[in-house]
Image (cartoon, grey):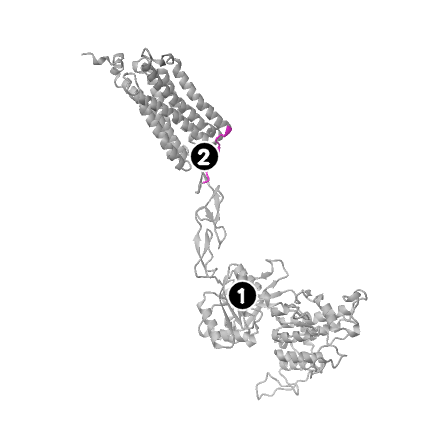
Amino acid sequence: MLFAVEEANRDPNFLPNVTVGFQLYDSCVSGTQALGSTLGLLSGQHLPTPNFDCHPQHQLLGVIGGLTSPESEAMAALLSVYQVSQISHGSQHPQFSDHHRFPSFLRTVPSRAHLPQAMAKMLLHFQWTWVGLVGSDSGAFESLDQELRKEVGKNGGCVSFSEKIDYHKVHIDNAVDAIQDSTAKVIICDCYHVHFILLAKTLQKKNVTNRIWLMSTSFLADASVLNREAREMLNGSLILEIHSGLLPGLEHFLSTLHPTMYPDNHMIKLFWQELLGCTWPGLKHFGSPEGQVSQNCTGLEQLTPTLLSALNLNDLTSTYQAYLAAKAFLVAYDNLRACSPGKGPFTDGNCAIRGDVKPWQLLQYLRTVNFTTEAQEKIFFKKNGEIPAIFDVINLYLAPDYTLQTTKVGHLDFREPPGKELVINSSIIIWAKGPGKVPLSDCSKICPLGTRKSAVQGQPSCCYQCLHCPKGEIAYVPDSASCLKCPEDQWSNNENDQCIPKILDFLSYKEPLGIALATCTIFLFLLSLTILGIFMWHHYTPIVRANNKKLSYILLCSLALCFLCPLMFIGRPVPLTCALRQVVFGIIFTVCVSTTLAKTIIVVSAFRTTRPDAKLRKWAGPSLPKMILIGCSLVQVVLCMFWVIGWPPVPMNSTEAGPKVTMLCSAGSSELFYAMLSYLGFLALVSLVVAFLARQLPDTFNEAKHITLSMLVFSCVWIAFIPAHLSAQGKDTVAVEIFAILASGAGLMGCLFFPKCCIILLWPEKNTRDKMLGKHHFQK
C-alpha cells in the first residue's frame, strides 16, 4: 500500500497538487478488533464516538481490508451504513457478492464460488476422475462439497469422500481413515495450513503417503510455517493461488526504504526490526529468544539483496492484491477530480465538489474504475464487486535439501472463452515420482476402444466395468458411455472400434452352393436335350407316335429352357436379370404345365370321342392342343407383362444384421409374384384332377398315370416352396427358388419321359405296334 501511494505521489501527472496519505490499523485477524478499528476511522480518533466525526477535516473516503472474511464481514456491515467504500484484498466468502447486503463492498480477489469450477477444470486437465475432499470447517465447506460434486460429475468424475478437519483429533483421525481406505490418489484440500499440519503428521504416523494434494486458495504455502511432515506430504502437489502480477519497481523501493523517511510510521519500524533482527527503543523484538539481547536499530542500516530475499518477492499474492486495492482508490479519486462540469455521473451531469467529496460519490467512481497496471494488466470491477477471477497454478516440490520450493506452472483465467480458461505447462511440473510422471487417480481404468462403460450397482458413477460392444455396434472413443449402431450398409470390425462397409454377398458361381446348382442346371439341361434327341431319333416308333410327339417335343424344349432359367438367378443381380428371371421362368413353366394339361385332355378326349354319342367329338381335333397351349400360356404372358411394366423387380441390398449385405432382386410386387405362382398351381391342379380321373381308362396309350404322378411331384415341390421361401433369408431365398425350379422340372421330365426312354433304349421289343395294342395277350 505504501508503495502504491509513493508511486502516485511521485507521478506529477497523477493527482497534481495532491498528496495522498493513509492510516494503518492492525485488526489482529479478529472481527471484533476490525470493527473497533473501523469505528475509530469513522470517528476520526482512537477512542471512537459512534455516529460522530470528530475530525471532519480528515474525512474518510474509503477503507482497504480486511484480509479474512470474518474481519471483512464486521467492517462491511458497518461501512455500508455510511456508504463508505471498502475494498478487501483477501476476503473470498461468496456472501460478499450480495450487494443488497453489502452495497459498498468490493474486492480484488475472486469469490470462493469459483473454486469448484476451477478445481474441476484442473482435474479434467490431468484426467483425474476419482478424488477425495478434505476441508477446514470455515462455514462454506458444505457448499463447496455440493458444488464440487456437480462440477466434477459434469466431466464424468466423482468424489470418493469428503471430510472436515479442525483442531479436534477425532476429526483428523476420521479424515486419515477416509484417505487410507479410499483408492483415490488425488486429494483436494480446502484447508488452512494449521489444520493441514496436524493432518500431515497423523498421515505420516500411519504411513499413508503417495497422495497428490490439490490445495485451494485457503492454504498458505509458506515453508517457514510448515513442519517437515507437511512439506514431505506436499511434494509433487499443486496449489491454486489467487493471481499475483508483477510490481515493477517494488524491489528498488524496498532497497531504498529507511525508517527515517517515515518517522511516525510504527509499521515501518516493526518491519525494519523483524527483517534486520535489531531492536527499536520501546518496541519488543518478537524474533529474539528470551534472555538474548539484540543491538539497537539506527535506521541507517542497508537492506542488502540477501535480506530482501527473505521477503520472497516472487510470491506477492496478498501484497499484489493490496496494491491493486490502493491503486483502484487512487485512480477513482483521480477520475473524480478530473470531472468536467456537465459531464459528471450525478444528477444533471454534476461533479463532486473537490473540497467536499462524499464517500458515496467516490464509491460511484470506484465501481466504474478501469485502469492498466505498470505490468500491463487491465483491472476493473464487475457488477458483483470483484475483479475478473484469475488464479495461478503453483507446483510444490521438495528440493534435495528438503526445502519446499514453488514454481508457477500455469494459470486459470475466467475471462477467456470456455475451454481455454486453463493453461498449464505440464512439462515443467515436478511430480513426486519425477518430472513427466503424471499420477493417475481413477476408480476404474479407461475403457478401451470397442467397449462401453457399465455402471456397477452400489458404486459411484465413475466406478464402472467395461463391456464389449455387441456386433454391429462400435465405440470409437475411449471411455464411451454407449455403443453406436453402424449404418445399415456397414458393420463393425473385429475390434468394434469402427464401422466398415459390409461385404457384398450373392449366390455366385465361385461358391460351393452356386457351383452345385449350376452343375445340376447344366446336367438337367443336357439330359432334357438328350431325351429330346432320343425322341426325335425314334420318332417313327409307336411309343413316340402314340404320345403326341409334337406336344412331347414342345414339353421337352420348354423343360430344357426351364433348366436354363436358374443361370439367371446365379451371379450378381443386375437390372436386366432381375426384370427377366421371374418372368421367363413363369412363362416357360406355364408352357410346360399347359402342354401337360393338353396331353391329359387329349387322352381323355381321344377315349370319349370313340363313342358314337360323344358330345366331345366336335371339339376333339388337331386344333385342340394348340388352343389349350396358346390360351393358357397367353394368360400368364399378359400377367407377367403387366408385372414387369408396372412394378419391375430391381436389384436391392438386404438389411439383415451381419457383416455381409446380400444383393437380391426385389419382388417388385409380391402380390403379382404369388399370382403368377398361383396361376401355375391352378393349371397344375387342373392337370392333376383330369389325369387322376382318366387314370383307369382302358387304353394302352393312356399316360394319365404318369401325368398324375408328375403333377403330384410338381404340386408338392411348389407347395413346399412357399413356406421355405418365406422363412429363408438372404441368398438362401434364391437357392430355394432354384431348387424348386430344378426339382419340379426334373419331376415332370422323370415321370413323363424316363419310362418311355427305358422302353426305347432298354426294351425295344416292347416298342412295337402289337405290344402297344396289347395283342400279345392273344398269341400263343
Q: Relative to 508, is 51 on the left or the right?
A: right
- Write down the residue under mark 1: 146
Furthest-left residue in this view = 780
Which numbered dot is residue 347?
none
**Quadrant in which the N terminus appears:** bottom right
Q: Amino acid at mark 2?
A: Leu
Cα gap from disc 1 to disc 2, whole angstroms: 60 Å
* Residue 436 screen position, x and y as percent: 52, 62
Decide: few, some or many residues near mark 1? Use Cα within 10 Å; few <14, some 14-19, many ≥20: few
Q: Please name the predominant secondary structure of the magenta segment in the image.
A: loop
Name the secondary structure under disc 2: strand
**Is 551 situated above or below 89?**
above
Among the two numbered marks 1 and 2 on one chain, the one whose residue lies closer to the N terminus: 1
> Residue 535: in sight, yes or no?
no
Residue at point 45% right, 26% down? 583
Q: Amino acid at mark 1?
A: Gln
Query: Which stretch is magenta?
Result: 646-655
Q: Relative to 380, is 184 on the left or the right?
A: left
- Who is closer to the viewer here, 165 or 143? 143
Instruction: State which mark lies toward you, 1 or 2.
Output: 1
**Quadrant in which the C terminus appears:** top left
* Residue 239 screen position, x and y as percent: 56, 68
- Write down the residue under mark 2: 664
Q: Quadrant of residue 22?
A: bottom right
